[in-house]
Image: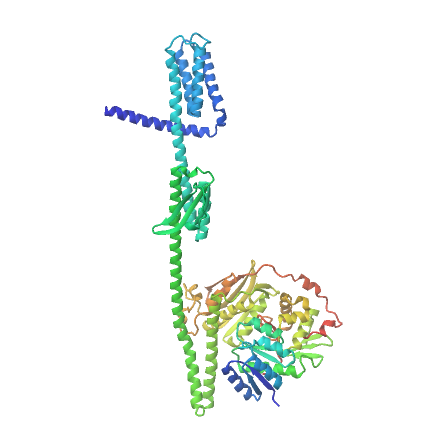
């Protein structure tokens, strides 16, 4: 059976568009126009994925995310307007899986949804095997070895940890805070410059052209994302 | 009769001039003279010297010569030291003349009463010369005082006319008035000034034409300061001049306000005409294509439908960009977008801009030239990306082909260059193209409000940087902007120290490396 998607969005034209797009792909669809309605529908229907607008009339989307995360790990993709970087960060830190900036194309929407659903199907962020692969990059978690194509790449421990976190969450945006906490520990969540320097180093070791990365993507003002390995 | 009067008058005048010149010289000497305390002893000493000299060099019968010498001494003392010492000198001279030179010698007795005339003359000379000197001296002092005040007024006016803003002007005026009048200075609206019981303070209206600015109050340290009418007059002159300058400053700021209003009005109408045209064009396409699809969807062939749908998609994206630019500009201008400076890798800023532009860069062949090290610069990544994107869009629109992006750190600044090989900028329009709603005159047909470059400029200025464009040989334009690199460069030393050579055993971190 196709996954059930809950859309929480106050703008009727946007809901109409999403309904048309999602049903054309065969997704099952439920919609709510306020945060409160969204929360109760989520509890009743146990959707497989939530598309959540940040600017709701009653509750703000960040609060909805927080309340959902109290009891469910169902993937949440936040829909937001441009220039709301801080809201995006807050939503991601509150537990949202990804965000899309309005206006967006449906191709982009379906790609993000597939990544989120696949990760959810794996059982949250659990990794299935000892070897992670995205495009040409392969990370062997047992041997702690990294390959780009056939070439083995030597990373420092921090570079390796950073890459491993990104690979395990491939396709998902990780905020600066999340990455710093994972790799450097909770005491360093504000030292974004560490992260910047190591991302540059990683790109130089892994990317063909570090200035035009194909894997290690910058989400400006928000964080980083390992490009998902998925033909769209 | 008349001529005699004139002669007397003329000679009096020339005498006065002569005396004044002499007095000025004496005063100037007097300023270096060792103190007034010694004036009286020095007067007596002068007479004693003259007396001894006369005794040594003249026969006692040459009484006229001796008397002249004494007169000379009295005259000099009168010139130099004024009335008191000169009278003392006259007394001393009479005494010494009588005692040493008039028989019977060495007594104060006077045998011949004709000598009494000499004595009287001596006193008269002392009185007349010192009196004249007093007059001349006080006149010279008064003129010096006037000169000083004129100079004070001039320097006040000069500094005041250079001061910008009322607050600064008040500060300058207060400083000068305090110095010139040795008084406490207050400006205010008349009823607001605190009342002083003593009436020694001087209150002057600051008025220029019909416009009253308030009251200037001078409260002198010396209570008698403003009893001198000349001082009061001077203070009034100061007040009048200050009022004139206040009015001038007020007029200037009024003119500036009107100028800005006119300019913003022009901007608004330019915006309106530009918005109505540029927003309607894509809307018209979308509306037309959509209604065609709704009304005759079945009659249209597959190819025609796809054509209409893709033009809807394209025009919608264009609309989105136009509105985004408009919003950006409005927010930047209203100051609603704060610059969030962070330490970022130069390479990442450029890279993120290129990634975001990827779908729209097909017309460009981009070459990137970046420093190979991990250079960190403090800037707002989202905003500077926008600058680079706008410059690249500009290039894609007007100069498709090879575009070079260069970034480097130079003398505490970070420099970005985006160079295309298109037709370049019309000479003379290098500044103009950064204005709102401007497009290069050669490029009128292109879509857009012409806001892209003015957004660039607004962002760069908000960073405290500069942006400009110049044409390059043989062709193309080079857009260049520099930003201050930022202070307080973050310490990375601690970070490096954490790093050890690659271990073979997996450390604990990698296990828990997910949330």
B95 on left or right of A193: left
Residue positioned 41% across, 77% down in the render: B280
Q: Is residue B376 above or below residue B196?
A: below
Q: Is residue B353 above or below residue B247?
A: below
B107 on left or right of A142: left
Name the residue at the left extreme.
B1
* Viewer-side residue, A130 vs B125: B125
Name the residue at the bottom extreme.
B298
B114 on left or right of A11: left
* Viewer-side residue, B33 vs B188: B188
Residue positioned 39% across, 22% down in the render: B127
Q: Does any portion of residue B164 appear in the rendered image?
A: no
Q: Measured from the top left, where is residue B503 in percent x and y?
A: 74, 69
Quadrant (top left/top right/bottom left/bottom right) for the N terminus of chain A: bottom right
Q: Measured from the top left, where is residue B72 in percent x and y?
A: 41, 19
Q: Is residue B44 above or below residue A109?
A: above
Name the residue at the right extreme.
B505
* Viewer-side residue, A32 vs B77: A32
B17 on left or right of B482: left
């Amino acid at each position: 059976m196709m996954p059930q998607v809950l859309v929480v969005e106050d703008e009727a034209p946007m809901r109409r568009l999403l309904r048309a797009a999602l049903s054309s792909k065969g997704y099952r669809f439920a919609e709510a126009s306020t945060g409160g309605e969204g929360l109760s529908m989520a509890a009743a229907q146990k959707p497989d994925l939530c598309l959540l607008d940040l600017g709701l009339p009653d509750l703000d989307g960040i609060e909805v995310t927080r309340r959902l995360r109290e009891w469910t790990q169902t993937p949440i993709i936040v829909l937001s307007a441009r220039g709301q970087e801080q809201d995006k960060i807050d939503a991601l830190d509150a537990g949202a899986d990804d965000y899309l900036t309005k206006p967006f194309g449906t191709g982009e929407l379906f790609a993000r949804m597939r990544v989120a659903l696949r990760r959810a199907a794996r059982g949250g962020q659990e990794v299935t095997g000892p070897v992670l692969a995205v495009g040409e990059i392969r990370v062997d978690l047992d041997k702690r070895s990294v390959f780009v194509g056939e070439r083995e790449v030597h990373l420092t421990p921090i570079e390796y940890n950073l890459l491993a976190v990104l690979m395990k969450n491939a396709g998902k945006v990780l905020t600066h805070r999340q990455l710093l906490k994972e790799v450097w520990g909770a005491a360093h969540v504000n030292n974004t410059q560490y992260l910047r320097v190591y991302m540059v180093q990683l790109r130089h070791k892994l990317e063909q052209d570090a200035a035009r990365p194909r894997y290690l993507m910058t989400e400006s003002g928000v964080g980083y994302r390992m490009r998902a390995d998925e033909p769209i | 009769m008349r001529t005699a009067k004139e002669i007397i008058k003329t000679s009096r005048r020339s005498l006065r001039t002569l005396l004044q010149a002499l007095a000025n010289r004496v005063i100037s000497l007097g300023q270096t003279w060792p103190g007034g305390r010694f004036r009286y002893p020095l007067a007596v000493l002068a007479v004693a010297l003259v007396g001894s000299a006369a005794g040594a060099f003249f026969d006692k019968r040459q009484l006229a010569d001796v008397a002249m010498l004494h007169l000379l001494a009295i005259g000099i003392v009168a010139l130099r030291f004024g009335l008191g010492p000169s009278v003392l000198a006259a007394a001393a001279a009479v005494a010494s003349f009588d005692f040493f030179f008039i028989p019977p010698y060495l007594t104060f007795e006077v045998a011949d009463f004709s000598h009494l005339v000499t004595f009287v003359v001596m006193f008269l000379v002392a009185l007349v010369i010192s009196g004249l000197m007093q007059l001349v001296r006080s006149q010279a002092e008064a003129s010096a005082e006037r000169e000083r005040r004129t100079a004070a007024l001039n320097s006040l006016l000069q500094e005041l006319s250079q001061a910008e803003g009322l607050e600064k002007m008040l500060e300058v005026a207060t400083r000068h008035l305090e110095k010139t009048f040795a008084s406490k200075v207050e400006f205010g609206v008349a009823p607001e000034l605190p009342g002083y019981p003593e009436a020694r303070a001087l209150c002057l209206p600051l008025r220029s034409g019909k416009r009253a600015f308030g009251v200037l109050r001078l409260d002198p340290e010396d209570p008698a300061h403003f009893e001198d009418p000349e001082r009061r007059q001077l203070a009034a002159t100061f007040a009048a001049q200050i009022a004139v300058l206040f009015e001038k400053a007020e007029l200037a700021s009024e003119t500036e306000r009107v100028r800005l209003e006119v300019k913003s009005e022009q901007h608004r109408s330019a915006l309106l005409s530009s918005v109505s045209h540029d927003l309607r064009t894509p809307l018209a396409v979308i509306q037309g294509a959509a209604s065609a699809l709704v009304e005759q969807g079945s009659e249209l062939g597959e190819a025609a439908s796809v054509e209409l749908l893709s033009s809807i998609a394209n025009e919608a994206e264009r609309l989105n960009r136009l509105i985004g630019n408009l919003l950006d500009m409005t927010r930047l201008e209203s100051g609603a977008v704060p610059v969030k400076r962070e330490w970022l890798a130069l390479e990442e800023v450029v890279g993120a801009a290129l990634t975001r532009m990827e779908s729209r860069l097909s017309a460009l062949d981009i070459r990137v030239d970046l420093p190979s090290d991990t250079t960190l610069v403090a800037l707002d990544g989202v905003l500077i990306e926008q600058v680079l994107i706008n410059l690249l869009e500009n290039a894609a629109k007007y100069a498709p082909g090879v575009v070079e992006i260069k970034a480097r750190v130079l003398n505490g600044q970070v420099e970005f260059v985006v160079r295309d090989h298109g037709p370049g900028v019309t000479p003379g329009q290098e500044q103009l193209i950064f204005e709102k709603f401007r497009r290069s005159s050669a490029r009128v047909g292109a879509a857009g409000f012409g806001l892209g470059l003015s957004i660039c400029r607004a962002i760069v200025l908000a960073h405290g940087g500069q942006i400009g464009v110049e044409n390059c040989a043989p062709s193309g334009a080079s857009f260049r902007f520099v930003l201050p690199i930022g202070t307080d460069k973050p310490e990375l030393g601690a970070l490096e120290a954490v790093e050890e050579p690659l271990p073979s055993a997996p450390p604990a971190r990698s296990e828990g490396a997910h949330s």
